[in-house]
Structure formats: structure tokens, C-alpha cells
Amino acid sequence: MRIPFPVRIRITFVVLALAALAVPTLAQAGPLRVLAVMSYGPDFPWTAEIMEGIQQELGDAAEVTWFHMHTKRDLAGGPAQAEKAFELYKTMRPDGVIACDDNAQAMFVVPFLKDKVDTPVAFCGVNGDPAEYGYPASNVTGVKERLHLAESVAFAQQLDPDIRSVCYLTKKSPTGTALQGEVVRLEDTLPARSLDYRYAETLDQALEYALEMSSYCDLLFVAALEGVPDKNGNPVPDSVAMPAVARAFDGPTIGTSSYAIELGLLCSVVKTGQEQGRLAAHQLLRAMTGTPIKDIPIQTNILGKRIINVTEMRNLGISPDPMALKGAELTRIP
């Protein structure tokens, strides 16, 4: 039997209306719920950058609940904080999880979420090899943190052509260990010879190592000092540790982030937390809206920003070729 044209139109409208009711849109369902577990506190500049990137990407599509493990300040208390994060996860029942930096992976995602729940998880800020955490997993993908080490060494050489060797100084911590692994992996790509890698357990030891290495290294890489204890056992922020180490070395220094250069290191090609946060949030949005995790590969940050502390450059008596300054962001110590 042939259905009259007006009736076919009415039937079509009914079918479309029923389909709209059966499959609500994101706007109809309300914003997605995301739990973001941060290894460090919100006062740590790197964490603040990542949080900014996450918010930029998610916008109004998701409501983010933040949980800070504060492992820069209290590494030993990290597992207890991870248990609290998991209790929050069970209460909140989020649509997705973002876990930032290595401690959140080792202490939270791997023991509680990886291959144990259906909730999609996106990591970011991971210095170590993701495979060490068993990533990718059935419900986990994310962003590997790429260190722009070769580019930073080459940039320092543009400012000071006499640089032939580089040494490394970090706090004794999981991040410091992961950074050393990255240095070893990249060593053959460096335009300067790597001579030494030291872990400092206290601020005084960091200053001692910096002074010692100044006698045989042309360039010092400084990173992950946040929370290194002073002589009284109190954690020291990067705002105190970084400039003190730079003064003790009294030579060209490079780091991994823009705030390290602003605090007194000489220069670097830096990664940004904003990029880490944006990429991880984008991956999670895809997973929460139906893309299988297996179709969302692990990514690596690609952007780098050249930055120079001109105050430190002048303190060291460096007068670079003007072309080395072209396109670089300049900062000063107030």
C-alpha cells in the first residue's frame, strides 16, 4: 500500500523525535564529570599550567573535580592520598579521569584503576616510559612528557659557544629518576658531552654538588628540586632552590619549564603544562564521547618555547650574537 506524502512526513517527524529522546545529546545530558588527580599541589607552577590547559580544552563540556596529592611536599604520604582519591572516585563515579605526573600513575591509576574499571583515564606529565606503568591499557591512554634537552643544550651554545659539556642535578625522587632515564635515552642526540648526573637529598647537598660540578662542567641542567628539604627538614620551593643552585654553579644553566628560567636559570627550550593538559583533556573527551581507548594512541608534546633570563645572562657576562635572541621570549629577575 502506498503511504500518502503528508503521512510519510508525519511518520518521519515521529521517528526523529523518538530518536532524539533515545539518544540525548551532550547538552541535554548535562556536562560530563571529570576527576583530575594531580600529583602535586595547586601552588606548584607546573600543576597550575596543566590545570589551565585542562580547563581550556574541556570548557563547558565537563565539570572538573580536582584532587591534589601534594607529593612534592610529602612523598611518603602519597599512597594514603591516593587511597583518598580512590574513595572520591567511588563516591563521585566520574565519566572520566585525568591523572597528572608520574606519582599519580604509580600510586593511584596503576593500583586502583588500570584494567580494573571501565572509566576512561588520560594521563599527562609522565617523564618515564609509559610502558613501565603498563600503558596503554584497556582504559588508559595519555601524553608522554617530552624533554626538549638537545634543543636546550644547543640553545645555550648559541648564547655561549664555549659550552662543550653538561652535568645534571635533580632532587632524589621518582621524577628525578625518570628524568635521568630520559637523559640516557637522549644522550646520543646531544651537542655537548654528558659528564655527570647527581641526585640531591637536601638543599645543602644540591648547592655542594652545583659548586663541585662547576669545576668540570660548562653547563648545568637543573630540574625537579621542588620540595628538597633544608637543614631543618622543611621542604624548600623551587623559588628558593633554583636561584640558589644557579648562584652556586655560577655558569650557564638550563631547565625544563618557563618558571625555572624566570626564577634564575639562564635559558631553555621549555615544554608547557598547558600543552600537556590540553592534549590529555582532548583525549579524554574523545573517550567519554564514544571513541574506544584502543583508537586513542599515546601522544607526546611537540611544542617548545625558547626563553632567556637576560638578568642571568648579564650576570654571567654573556654577550650573544643578536641572532640567538631572535624569536626568544625574554624574562628578567625583578
Image (cartoon, grey):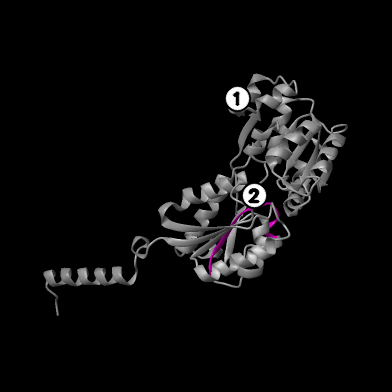
| Foreground of the two, 313 or 190 | 313
| Foreground of the two, 59 or 139 | 59
Say if the magenta span includes residue 128.
yes
- Residue 329 position, x and y percent, is 59, 30
Please indicate whether residue 207 sits to the left or right of residue 280 in the image.
right
Q: Residue at x 59, y 46 (%)?
A: 273
- Residue 92 position, x and y percent, is 50, 68
Could you tell me the amino acid type at mark 2?
Glu
Q: Residue at x 49, y 57 (%)?
A: 64
Please indicate whether residue 12 sits to the left or right of residue 99 in the image.
left
Please indicate whether residue 185 sits to the left or right of residue 292 in the image.
right
How crowded pointer 1 is (Cα within 10 Å; few <14, some 14-19, many 20+) is rated as: few
Element at badge 2?
loop
Distance between the alpha carbons at the discs numbered 1 and 2: 26 Å
Element at badge 1?
loop
- Residue 257 position, x and y percent, is 64, 40
Q: Quadrant of the C terminus?
A: top right
Q: Is residue 180 visible?
A: yes
User: Disc 2 marks which residue?
Assistant: 145
Magenta residues (range): 119-131
Vertically, is 79 above or below 158? below
Vertically, is 228 above or below 325? below
Could you tell me the amino acid type at mark 1?
Lys
Image quadrant of residue 324? top right
| Foreground of the two, 83 or 212 | 83
Tag 1 near tag 2, CB within 8 Å: no
- Report the disc number at residue 326: 1
